[in-house]
Image: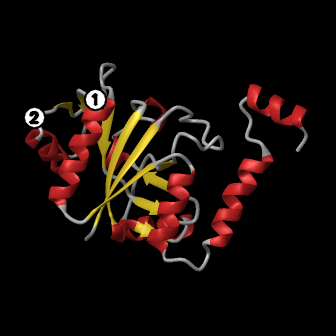
């Protein structure tokens, strides 16, 4: 790509073909890799922060470090189990999204290994659009939630019943994700 086209694509915030090809090349090079490894590589490539946690104690410690480093003090968290983590850390949270929330601590439906994206639904973000979430998003998931591709995730969702407000998000460096250009996305991946 010529220098002029690169400059124009940066100014107009359009993804340049090199970035798209880079993600595709990485995905192709990992096609025979384990799903968890492939997901972690593509998730971090798109700008996400990946944290593997062997157990809940390690997840709690990692969550505490993220909250301190990011200066997050008022968290949106609608999941009762995740609210327990925040209570242990004595961190303020709201079960409904509010303007003053500086971070979100949520669960997810599935982790898509094909492109490193995270699938969310109304179970995770209620009726809110993903673009309305705070810029700092912390997601807790289990290794068993990793699926190969979007088709596998949709098949599992179809078998599990009616799920509304389906969307997916990726790390803030992925220029293909126009809904969240400045998000900081943290994943705490727990062993089942």
Of 52 and 145, the residue lying toward us? 52
Q: How many marks?
A: 2
Q: Residue furthest top?
A: 100
* Quadrant containing the N terminus in the rendered view: top right
Q: How many residues crowd around disc 2 within 10 Å: few (fewer than 14), some, or many (20 or more)? A: few
User: What is the secondary structure assignment of the residue under circle 1?
Assistant: loop
Question: Residue, x 61% and y 36% (percent of image)?
Answer: 178
> Is residue 155 something that shows in the picture?
no
- Find disc 1 in the rendering and name its residue: 72
Question: Residue, x 82% and y 36% (percent of image)?
Answer: 6
> Is residue 83 something that shows in the picture?
yes
Of 141 and 37, the residue lying toward us? 37
- Point out residue 186 in the picture as x, y percentages from the top left corner: 38, 46
Does 40 sit above or below residue 170? Answer: below
Of 169 and 184, the residue lying toward us? 184
- Point out residue 137 in the picture as x, y percentages from the top left corner: 38, 39
Q: Quadrant of residue 128?
A: top left
- Find disc 2 in the rendering and name its residue: 90
- Point out residue 24 in the picture as x, y percentages from the top left corner: 70, 61
**Comes first in the chain, label 1 or label 2:** 1
Q: How many residues crowd around disc 1 within 10 Å: few (fewer than 14), some, or many (20 or more)? A: some
* Quadrant containing the C terminus in the rendered view: bottom left
Disc 1 and disc 2: Cα gap in Å?
A: 12 Å
Does 116 sit above or below residue 92? Answer: below
- Point out residue 34 in the picture as x, y percentages from the top left corner: 49, 77
Q: Quadrant of residue 177?
A: top right
């Amino acid at each position: 790509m010529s220098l002029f086209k690169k400059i124009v694509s940066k100014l107009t915030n359009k993804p340049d073909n090199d970035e798209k090809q880079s993600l595709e090349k990485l995905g192709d090079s990992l096609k025979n890799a384990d799903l968890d490894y492939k997901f972690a590589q593509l998730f971090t490539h798109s700008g996400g922060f990946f944290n593997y946690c062997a157990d809940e104690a390690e997840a709690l410690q990692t969550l505490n470090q993220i909250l301190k480093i990011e200066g997050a003090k008022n968290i949106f968290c609608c999941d009762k189990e995740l609210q327990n983590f925040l209570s242990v850390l004595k961190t303020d949270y709201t079960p409904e999204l509010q303007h003053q929330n500086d971070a979100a601590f949520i669960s997810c439906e599935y982790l898509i290994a094909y492109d490193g994206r995270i699938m969310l639904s109304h179970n995770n973000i209620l009726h809110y659009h993903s673009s309305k979430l705070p810029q700092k998003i912390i997601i807790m998931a289990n290794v068993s939630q990793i699926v190969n591709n979007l088709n596998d995730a949709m098949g599992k969702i179809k078998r599990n019943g009616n799920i509304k407000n389906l969307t997916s998000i990726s790390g803030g460096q992925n220029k293909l994700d126009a809904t969240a250009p400045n998000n900081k996305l943290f994943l705490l991946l727990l062993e089942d």
